[in-house]
Image (spheres, rainbow, N blue to C red):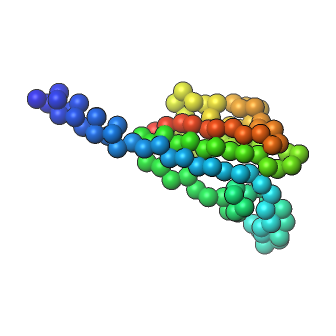
Amino acid sequence: MLKSIIIALASTSLALAATVTYNWDITWVTAAPDGFSRQVIGINGQWPCPPIEATVGDTVVVNLTNQLGTESTGLHFHGLTQFGTNIMDGPTMVTQCPIPPGSTFTYKFQVFR
């Protein structure tokens, strides 16, 4: 009986997991993060950059398009454990090649904590 309850609970948590998808254009935007207006890197024309909202067990998909002109880029997800998907965690030239200007990359990973 206990075994079937544990299996049922495990199945329920998997059924509740979702895929959370973001489509992000990385561009230059004008902002004043320290009180002085200048060009900074933004997402979808925004600075500060939007947060990722997901629940433990969810799969996060970020479709990133680099529109920085002549600059390459990449994303690093601070505070998210990457079990088996370290290539999805940047930083560039450490675990991921940089995303060239005009190119796209899809990050996909499961949220563990």
- The number of discs equals 0
> Could you say which quadrant of the image residue 79 lies in?
top right
**Is 17 left, or right, of 40 in this rendering?**
left
The one of 80 and 74 positioned closer to us in this rendering:
74
Q: Quadrant of residue 15?
A: top left
Outermost residue on the right side: it is: 70
Q: Please give left or right for residue 104 compared with residue 107 in the image.
A: right
Looking at the image, residue 26 lies above or below residue 47: above
Residue at coordinates 53% horizontally, 42% vertically from top-left? 60
Give the residue at x 47% y 43%: 19
Q: Quadrant of the N terminus?
A: top left
**Residue 10 position in % (x across, y down):** 28, 34
User: At 34% from the left edge and 44% from the top edge, which residue is drawn?
Assistant: 16
> Front-most of 37 and 104?
104
Work out which residue is located at the far left of the displayed protein and give it: 1
Does residue 98 appear to the left or right of 44 in the view shown? right
Q: Position of residue 82 (x, y in %)?
A: 55, 34
Q: Nearer the viewer, residue 104 or 5?
A: 104
Residue 94 in which image quadrant: top right
**Residue 14 spot, x, y in % from top left:** 34, 37
Residue at image point 81% right, 38% down: 100
Q: Is residue 48 left or right of residue 32?
A: left
Q: Is residue 8 above or below residue 50?
A: above
